Image (cartoon, coloured by chain):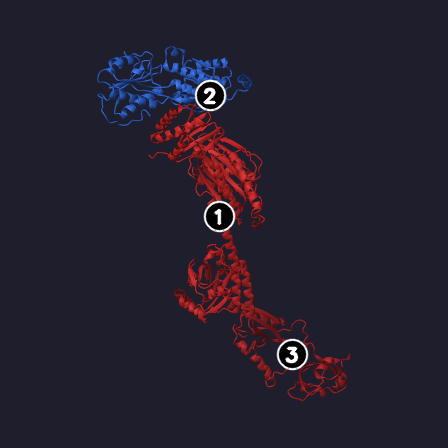
Chain colours: A red, B blue
Amino acid sequence: MTSDEVVMEPAPGDLGCPRGAATAVISPEGIVTGWSEEAGRLLGHQAREVVGRAAVELVAATGASDAAGFTPAGSSEWSGTATLRHRDGHRVDVMLRAYPSLAGDGTLQGYVLTAVPYAPESQDEHPMMDQAFTQASIAMSVFDTASGRWRLNTAAAGAAPAAGGEGADEPFLRHLHQVAEQGKPARFETHTPARSVSREQARIVELWPVRDPVSGQVCGVGTATFDSSQHHRARQRLALLNEAGTRIGTALKVVRTAQELADAAVPRLADFASVDLLDSVLQGEEPVPGPVGADVKLRRVAHRSSTSGTPEAAVPLGELDTYPAFTPPARCLATGRPVLTGKDDPDFLRWMALHEARSARVREYGFHSIMAAPLRARGITLGVAIFAKTQDSEPFEQDDLILAGEFADRAAVGVDNARRYIRERSATLTMQRSLLPRRLPAQAAVQAAFRYLPAGSRAGAGGDWFDVVPLSGTRVALVVGDVVGHGIRASATMGRLRTAVRTLADVDLPPDELLTHLDDLVRHLDSDDGTGDRGAVSGTDAEELGATCLYAIYDPVTRICTIASAGHPPPVALLPDGTVEVVQLSPGPLLGIGGLPFEATEVELPEGSLLAFYTDGLIEGRDHDVGAGLDRLCRTLADQSAPSLEVSCDAMLRALLPPTPGDDVALLLARTRALHADQVATWSVPASPSIVADARAQVGRQLAAWKLEEATPVTELVVSELVTNAIRYGAVPIGLRLIRDRTLICEVSDASSTAPHLRRARVYDEGGRGLDMVAQLTQSWGSRQTPTGKTIWAEQALPVG
Amino acid sequence: MPGTAGGTQTGPDPARAHTVGLVYPPAEPDGTYTEQQHDFIGGVAEAAARYDYDMLLSPSVTANEPSFRRMVSPGRVDGLIVMEIRLHDDRVEHLAKAGIPYVIIGRNSTADVTGWVDLDFVGMTANCVQHLADLGHRRIAFVNRSERLFASGYGPARLSLEGYTKAMAALGLTEHAYLCGDDDASGEAVLEKILLDDPATTSLVTMNEAALRGVYLGLKRHGRVVPRDFSVVAVTAGRWVEQISLRLSAIETPVAEMSRVAVDLLRERLISPGAPPRHVLLKPLVAQRDSTGPCRQLPGDEPDLEELEF
């Protein structure tokens, strides 16, 4: 709608009588009979000076005044302008109204006069005010509601967007009409959104009604428009900073944090932003504190442009670039403060001249204003963020520089946290990986597969571990353990335990005895840590080590699995007939408690049984109900009919674990093999010297049956030595065993466990030479204690072909 | 070791017919060969083939049989291997008289005039006894072949008994030797007798595979669980003993080796007829399986025995 169509009506409550009017009463004869205070203020006369005098005395010279036409003879209302004389002599232009006052019989008693000051429109008379309006620094305009005509001052005429006139925008006109209608002043604020904060324009418009001084009717609307862009931009920068606080550093990831910085800055702060980090930061090294010296090498980690594809970037992601000391990025790193530069800065131009690709990009995309802000946290310099304006964008202002600094600071804290977190986590994981088997050792007793999953949470890698240790006589040790806690310390303890278990397994201790030794070791570790470098350890480190371990030995000849546990959950077995059972064990105390015995349990397993060894992370699951978790594990294991254990491992982890497990998890699956009767031969050897020849012959016979004649000479020698030693130093019964598997194993056992626990040949005085020979002839040899004595074994590679 | 010098040997080749004869009467009552006999026949044939000999098989028990006479007819075979030899065996007498090269698997009192390969039944049985003694057994019975066979002078039966007696004497133990027929009923009966004679018996050595099932039945009836309460070891065992659920601790007859040695010995006779004959006595060890275990006194017997021992 246009202003022409507006019908002005008196606002409600407007009685047409302006407030603060001067009033006086005159008699029909024109004598002043009443005088108000306001009238006194208007003309400077006190009531006592005026009452009783002729009203006409107060009237100044005649002129254009309508008062000339006023005669107090009639009895009708009158209004018009008049020029009165102030007590001090100056003229006062007023809008005058006369209201007849009638007596009860209808005769005129007098008039009530009201007068309000009034400025005549005469340009001649007020040239200064008019000029002041025209030349005001504020854009002002007046809208005449009756005619719909506008009057704009110079500032308003040149304003964009229009500060009045036909071209004014919709909000302006809406508010204008509202003021005209309601007769109340109004104020509104608008801004023109722009891609960049520094381009945004904002204004505040004040509108007020203009009333006819005599009728009090709204006859027009006055406007004044102020530019509030600076204020608006400041608020916008604050909002942007606030937003950056929530957008930057959402994850403990270096590259992601850098990208978040670039994303937060473009396009609101800059047209192009890039984040470059010192290489050492990315490699997880601890950067040197303080500013960085000359010639900085930085790697591009993230960048972002308001143009899709970021074509402006002179350095591709992941590339390294060198920044000489004078360049803005190097300068900001040297000073530790953000730097504002641009095409007017000689250093900037010198930098561009250095770098072909960069200067080409700068020319092509019109980089003209650049900010470089250092990424620093905890006094450590991590890298630099660059912000740039291109083409026709407004150059950066000082306020932008502050904002850039804030952005960089926030990103720096995020990057530093991520860096430190990654550093610790990767150190722990590296350690964990180096401490866990990467692939399982070759052995034939079981087919095995394993998985180790570090915790998905920020807690880092834990102390879960497992191992498969080949033992003599084709047996194998299957181990799984758990050190309470997370992080490097748990991993380190895990490593010590695993090494200890390997060593003890190598001595071929039975499971219960092995755990007793391990228990001793953990107690020593505890006391070492408790008294040693206590000053260096924190409260959590000083806590007592909690560790569990399950140690099982499987013998494929007897198919017996001997298991002992130190507070570790029992293995679960899937038998070939499809039944699943939790192996019933005496749980045993945790390692490090000491004093309590460990008990070994023997289980005979059908060939092809699938054993699952695991840590509690696998069964705690979502609900932390271990009983329910164990049931779930049993059900899941029952489904594992696939021949591939790798497939089974994956399937079980999928079925049992939430997407990000809270605890680390180790799972070791072992499918048992059995050595068949034709792979093992055991003989009883009566203790008489003449039997040695029979034993040699027997071995030769057996090797012939196995078609391993090539191995006969060595094996006969080995048997001679071992049997001779057993007869000479051992105790009956003496047994001789040959195992043909991946290797050819020759074992001689006797009932003497008090005999020297030999690991090396020199223990024997006379037989030593022979055992030296055994050592030289065979791949490996050793001895182990057995429940009924000891066994000396020697292993040879099978003849090829 | 003897017999390992297989392969195609170079040197003077005395063979004319390039054939060896194997005289081997079937052991089964219906005139068929046992499984172990098949192994011997196969073993001899394979060993002979290594020297590029063919093998001719005769089931003759005596020299008068047409089969035997055909085999010894001139040019038929270069030499013979004779098996299942009796105390007085007219087959070897005929061969010796006729000057035909031959060797024997087994032996009798006259066997030494030519080469032979045999099992050392004395040593093997002694080893069985020793095996049980090493496991702590002191009451060890011996189950031999049938009375009829023993009376006929069957070598292995007599030699085994000799080994048992010697070993028990050497250990200072009381011997309990029994003869037993080759059937289940005899096996059961002999066990009854053993436990009647000495209820504290914890083990036995047997020469008689055929009676073994009966022995096991008897043990079962007496509630003796093998090897927990009672150990059983066999001096010789063929493959069929595997039919018994428990894997038997026993000495396995080294069939392949004996066959090979026999062919080697025969070849030696053919190459150097004048050389003194070689004799090979094999003493395989007791293969320890599931029927022998450490001696564990029966409940109730223990106090008695302890007192007796001291």
Up-down: is B152 above or below B55? above
User: Any mark on residue A429, and which?
Assistant: 1
Circle 3: residue type:
Pro
Give the residue at mark 2: B133
Viewer-proximal residue, B59 or A76? Answer: B59
Instruction: Give the residue type that dot 2 points to.
Output: Ala
Task: Count the labels in the image.
Answer: 3
- The reply, left or right, for residue B250 in relation to residue A215 is left
Q: Percent from the top left, x then y, of residue A798?
A: 36, 34
Residue A474 visible to an observer of this rendering? no
| Chain for disc number 3 | A
Q: Residues within 10 Å of mark 3 (few under 14, many from 20)?
A: some
* Rendered location of residue A401, percent (x, y): 51, 67
Select label 1 or label 2 by which is in front.
2
Q: CA distance from mark 1 to mark 3?
A: 86 Å
On whether disc 1 and disc 3 are found on a single subunit, the reply is yes
Q: Are circles 1 and 3 on residues that touch, CB within 8 Å?
A: no
Choose between A448 and B292: the one closer to the eye. Answer: B292
Query: Which residue, given by chain and number where applicable, does mark 3 sit on?
Result: A213
Discs 1, 2: same chain: no
N-term-proximal mark, 1 vs 3: 3
Q: Judging from the image, what secondary structure is the residue with disc 1 in?
A: helix
Q: CA distance from mark 1 to mark 2?
A: 58 Å
Rendered-image quadrant of the N terminus of chain A: bottom right
Secondary structure found at label 3: loop
- Disc 3 vs disc 2: which is toward the camera? 2
